[in-house]
Amino acid sequence: MSTAATPPDQPGAPLLQMRGIVKEFPGVRALDGIDLDVCAGEVHCLLGQNGAGKSTLIKILSASYQPDEGTIVWDGEERRLTSPMAAINAGIATIYQELDLVPGLTVAENVFLGHEKSRLGVSQRSVANRATRDLLKRLGHSEIAPHRRVETLSPAGQQVASMARALSHDTRLLILDEPSAVLDAGEVANLFRVIRGLTAEGVAVVYISHRLEEIREIGDRITVLKDGATVATGLSARDTPTSELIRLMTGRSIEYVFPPRSEKPFGDVVLEVEGLGLEGVFADVDLTVRAGEIVGLTGLVGAGRSEILETVYGARKATAGTVSVDGRRLRPGQVPAAVGAGIGLAPEERKSQGLLLDQSVADNITVSSLRSVSRFGFLDRGAERRKADELSTSLDVRPSGVARKVRTLSGGNQQKVVLARWLLRGCRVLMLDEPTRGVDVGARTEIYQLVRTLADSGVAVVVVSSEVDEVLGLADRVLVVREGVVVAEAPAGELDESKVLDLVMEGRVA
């Protein structure tokens, strides 16, 4: 049942009204009577755990899906949007977390892709470049050249290009799906500046994020979804207590805390990295991790954190230094050697780098341990299912069923599948790159507890995260990386967020 609360400063008249939206897939009722009002000139935040129905709802808004029941009123008129192009022509644009740009084309070519500037069938590149330049200036990013190839832009630059493309269609409602996922603190601040500029022009924004601190800063009102239904709408983004938002999302009260650190002494050094370097990216990295210890790496996006993990894993070939596991030096640039020595990596981009999305949960869990589920050189499907089922049950992967395609799982449950893979492998070193990106608050708590349990069992864990509080709360020891150099190393208990941010921004504590 919805809990409506109209804020005192409602931005404007309803531009979008959705009533009783239902969407069913075989065996699943993904949306069960969603209600949503979005006003012109507001930032309306959409909250909910993974699997709550947010993605399905925005696909209905963008007309990728058609609702089975319910009505959509757009600018005072009931509408049926029959295709994504119909939604775009109506003024509704969606920018997904995984941007759908064409890397090899220029910014201008991407902005006007599908509605190219032409005359008598001849492309007018100069006209497109001028129009793109005007859009980029409107977004406060005139430094981006329209003729620049999109693949050369930073993640933040690519997001700006996507927003320019949306605005090229005279957008009145902009839907942003986890827009800050690949941005550092400065880039998020700039994104918020752009959003405020758009809402000042009367553009409505639907903002989806798991980061509650962002919701407080940029949002006006909140709608909360749970199990495919609207459980609250019209809540004040600034005044609604965090505990209330978490209760609405999860159906229970969650103390957003990290598991206590182990009081047991750490074991012997498992992973030892000495003088590791990758030319042009990072240099002279020293790192040791003991059995039972969690070491955190933090720093800005682009500081070299992910590349350090990838080099230790052998996915990149080091140009200097050594990596050793249990005292045995590994050959650089050899992933099989790293895996054979007991190193596992849960990459930042789990969908594109860590999972076989169209394969089953069982296939994804056993892919690195096929020998353990084979007999006489042949895969034993029964053994594979049993081991996968045992691990998915112990990690509470939902929905249950190891035959289910991984693509159908939420972000948090996909991450559990990646962790299950390395549990089956029995890795000695587990490296986690942005382990809770795109993961809801309830699943975060479960993942934090799982990581701590693995460390307590003797696994050496390395965690990379852009969220300083996550690193400080989860790790035993922290390394701060700035522009490819480790500028500080200290026990987590000796650091706080302000000290880390000083190190990240200035390379020293102010």
Image: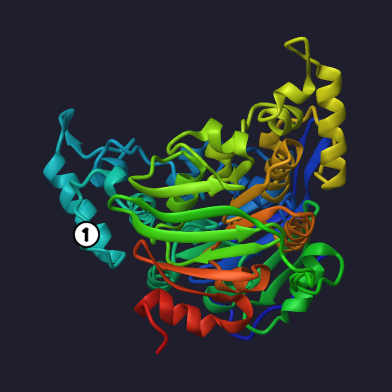
Residue 132 pos. (x, y %): 23, 52
Residue 404 pos. (x, y %): 77, 30
Up-down relation of residue 377 to residue 306 (above or below): above
Q: Quadrant of residue 45?
A: bottom right
Q: Which residue is mark 1?
A: 134
Residue 98 pos. (x, y %): 49, 45
Please name the residue shown 38% across and 55% down the image: 163
> Can you see residue 103?
yes
Q: Quadrant of the N terminus?
A: bottom right
**Residue 319 or residue 14, whichever sits in front:** 319
Up-down relation of residue 310 to residue 336 (above or below): below
Please name the residue shown 75% across and 57% down the image: 443
Please name the residue shown 83% across and 39% down the image: 391
Residue 258 pos. (x, y %): 74, 71
Q: Quadrant of residue 244?
A: bottom right
Up-down relation of residue 51 to residue 221 (above or below): above
Up-down relation of residue 253 to residue 270 (above or below): below
Q: Quadrant of residue 15?
A: bottom right
**Residue 166 or residue 332, whichever sits in front:** 332
Please name the residue shown 62% across and 47% down the image: 326
**Residue 507 or residue 46, whichever sits in front:** 507
> Can you see residue 13?
no
Dot 1, how many residues are within 10 Å of its Cα: few (below 14), some (14-19), or many (20+)? some
